[in-house]
Amino acid sequence: MSHQLGRLVSQILQRYFGEIVEKVGNDLFMYGIKPIGMIMKTTGLPRTQVIESLRTLLKFDLAKFESTSGNVDYKLLPDNVLVLIRYPRYLLQMKSKYGTEAELIVEELLQRAACSATLLLVSIANKYKDDTEKNLTIVTLKDTFISLATATYIQQAPVAQLKDGSDIPDLVQVASIVPDLDTRLLMQAMVNPADIKDNVYWKVNYDRFHQDFTDEIMINAMTRRIDDDAGEVMRLLIQEMYLSSSAWAEESNVVALTDLREHASRLKDRPLLQQHLEHYLKVMEENGAGFIRRAGDAGGGQYSVQVKWAARQLVESVLDHVVTERLGSKAARIFRLIRAKKYIEEEDIQKNAMLPNKECKQLTYKLLEEHFVSVQPMRKSQQVSGTQKGIYLYHVKLFDVVHVCREMCYRALHNLSRARSQLVSVHARALDKQRRVRTIVHGMRLRSEPQKNIDDVLETLTPPEVSLLAQVEKQLKQLSAAELELDRNLFILNWYLVYP
């Protein structure tokens, strides 16, 4: 694990959980697997604080424990820590697919890490029972929860089980069974929350969201490359893929043309797609960057989705963009040329890149210095004179370049997170005052108090403070947008690294 990843993990833990949890998490990242006693010794924290910090990390699935010879060792999960900055994308995904109720359920579950279905729904219903804009009912929340459990966006949390002859439990994943929630019991629990006896806990299934992200990336790529109907064909292929293939398979099982035609016939708003389905599949096979391939002729034709190849094409696009932003469009041209030619000599780069020799050499050496390209020394066959001349072949080690680019993403995310923390720290008093004013105003509006009283409270923020807070909010939004964009690139890079 890299130094840049450690800095980013430390910054995220401090931002979401505070300095004590960050200190314990950073210690685990540096030293790997450790028992509580060793954590206390290296961090200098008392036992109670170390235990509470580990409990927090375990609760949010940011660490795991292993029992060895009667001892319990703890290990940090850095990849799960990075998921914390992806929460806004999860909420947006839920709101766009299932509505406000699903967004609130997932948001509450992310904040609690794990919760029983009854307590979760009752807490949300009581929290928003006076909010006329959302107009939530316990019945709609129950139906939405069942829909999310059926679609596996949420799943049952692991259950602790004791091994034979051991006092240390292991967490065992259990199959998620869609709950049969009784509306009358939920209504009673809203009145008396203390009577809740639901012991089945639920958590967010991040893997299901990540599948949606990969599907959306491939569909959008096909839409931009060809048109909306091609994107819809890609969606149909992905839907069929999940019926017969594992979620992260390198290549899907074949899908028959007859099945695709049957699904396309149900799309009443796309008549062109129904008429020219075979033409679209042929165009997508020839000009769709290799996302699909024709695998056979049975049933009018069989097609498969090449997920691993799609990940490779998308990661190459990300790398081209990174090189362009970092070194310019001419360097990106050289980078694409070397990648396309596999192995190429320096003289051939200058001939094919259509750039002046001096500039081409400088950019090639810059790409080599930044580790975007590699060089392979070779020797020509011995000449009559007995002398040997060395040659150097430039090539792109895609796997290594992806790791280099991922380190850049870690560094950039750390810098963004640090800038955000400094901005919030400098303007903490003004932001705290704004937060208190908004809370008071929200309560007054729920109580339907006169607008004059609300305006009096709003006027406690002076015009200079309002102007300053507007600038701070604008900067925070820019930092958040940049953070999400970096996370998208990081997601594609990690998606490529999933496959060997």
Image: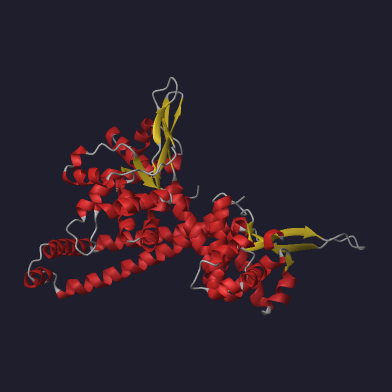
- Residue 17 image offset from top left, x and y in percent: 31, 48
Confirm whether residue 495 shows in the render: yes
Q: Nearer the viewer, residue 200 or 26?
A: 200
Position of 216 relative to 29 (above/below)? below
Number of numbered labels in the structure image: 0
Position of 409 relative to 353 (above/below)? above
- Residue 154 image offset from top left, x and y in percent: 39, 48
Q: Residue furthest top?
A: 165
Q: Is residue 79 left or right of residue 469?
A: right
Q: Nearer the viewer, residue 165 or 448?
A: 448
Q: Is residue 301 left or right of residue 237?
A: right
Image colouring: secondary structure
What residue appears at the point 23 percent right and 39 percent down from the top-left corner? Answer: 196
Q: Is residue 18 left or right of residue 25?
A: left
Position of 78 relative to 356 (above/below)? above
What residue appears at the point 37 percent right and 32 percent down from the top-left corner? Answer: 36
- Residue 407 image offset from top left, x and y in percent: 50, 57
Confirm whether residue 371 shows in the render: no
- Residue 25 image offset from top left, x and y in percent: 38, 43
Residue 193: quarter of image: top left
Q: Nearer the viewer, residue 458 or 36?
A: 458
Position of 243 relative to 474 (above/below)? above
What residue appears at the point 46 percent right and 53 percent down from the top-left corner? Answer: 4
Q: Nearer the viewer, residue 445 or 7?
A: 445
